[in-house]
Amino acid sequence: MLVVIRGAGDIATGVALRLFRSGMQIVMCDLPISTSIRRTVCFSEAIRLGSYSVEGVEAVKATDPQEALKLAQSHKIAVLADPEANCIKELKPQVVVDAILAKKNLGTTKDMAPVVIACGPGFEAQKDCDAVIETMRGHYLGRVWYFGKPIPNTAVPGLIGGYAGERVMRAPADGTFEGVASIGDMVHQGDVCGTVAGKPMLATLGGVVRGLIQTGAHVHKGMKSGDVDPRGVVAYSRCASDKAIAVGGGVLEAILNLSGALADSKPLVTEQGERPVRDDEEQNHE
């Protein structure tokens, strides 16, 4: 089964790992210059480096859809610099997954493939896609919604090690980002982790640099450009997060369910109605 994934950031990479390890062929599409933060666990790095491995799984940059297909068929994950996912028209995959996590729909439609799945807010199941995967940290994380919308974006980062918004580093100005620290470095609050237009981007708290946008990326003032993990475990920066793996599990469930329609068997979808009302308003999609 060929799956095209829109996005190759950390959540998309978690999705790709779950599907690849389940025997599916994967082609991923991302920006020519990625804005991924957790780059050590992002297959988007293959676009910059030519190839990149996460948890022992190798992704390789492809120059066109046919090369991507050959890579996918040779037990590698293919990554294309194709943010519009124009390759879908040529590849005609059985499944398309939107895992960009832009908090809005950047052009994914239900007619792109026999099965279309989207991750996070900005989508409505049965309108934009066949199913939406919940990306909100908390009780419903990874759940498949076959009808309606997921929990709306709150714009407040989720709790990690007891910290939420405090762990995010944001660009101090408009311009080109220059990294100073590296992902996996231990830092103290106030340490310089990068610069933009000569202005320093400081560590917001002490811990491990969990994410840092790549040098050369264009950023705007206030844009999320780094992340500090206060738990202080360097190994966490080298493996997919619990959230990414949970979302990937939801995508896998939806594919196995909905692809039953391709074999003339009825998908095991039940009428859900609206999503349950949550009582953990402090949680979010970061």
Image: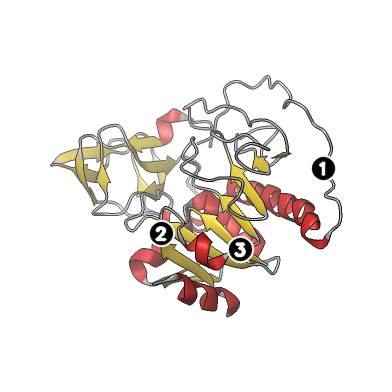
Give whichever of discs 3 and 2 has the lower sequence position. 2
Query: Residue 212: where, in percent of width, then height?
Result: 35, 49
Compared with residue 24, is residue 278 higher up or lower down, i.e. above or below?
above
Q: Quadrant of the N terminus?
A: bottom right
- At 44% from the left and 29% from the top, the residue drawn is 165
**Nearer-the-camera pick, 207 or 215:** 215
How far apart, in angstroms, are the residues tagged by discs 3 and 1? 22 Å
Amino acid bearing label 3:
Pro
Q: Residue at x 68, y 44 (%)?
A: 130
Q: Secondary structure at mark 2?
A: loop
Real-space Cα separation, disc 2 to disc 1, in angstroms: 32 Å
Q: Position of residue 136 (x, y in %)?
A: 60, 34
Q: Earlier in the sequence, mark 2 or mark 1?
A: 2
Residue contact at pointers 3 and 2, CB within 8 angstroms: no
Circle 3 — which element?
loop
Q: Are marks 2 and 1 in contact (CB under 8 Å)?
A: no
Q: Residue at x 57, y 38 (%)?
A: 120
Task: Decide: is 158 above or below 63.
Answer: above
Crowding at dot 3, Cα within 10 Å, few <14 / some 14-19 / many 20+, comes out as many
Q: Is residue 259 above or below residue 272?
A: below
Residue placed under numbered mark 2 in the picture: 82
Q: Quadrant of residue 48?
A: bottom left
Query: Which residue position holds label 3?
Result: 93
Q: Nearer the viewer, mark 3 or mark 1?
A: 3
Q: Which mark is residue 29?
A: none
Circle 1 residue: 269
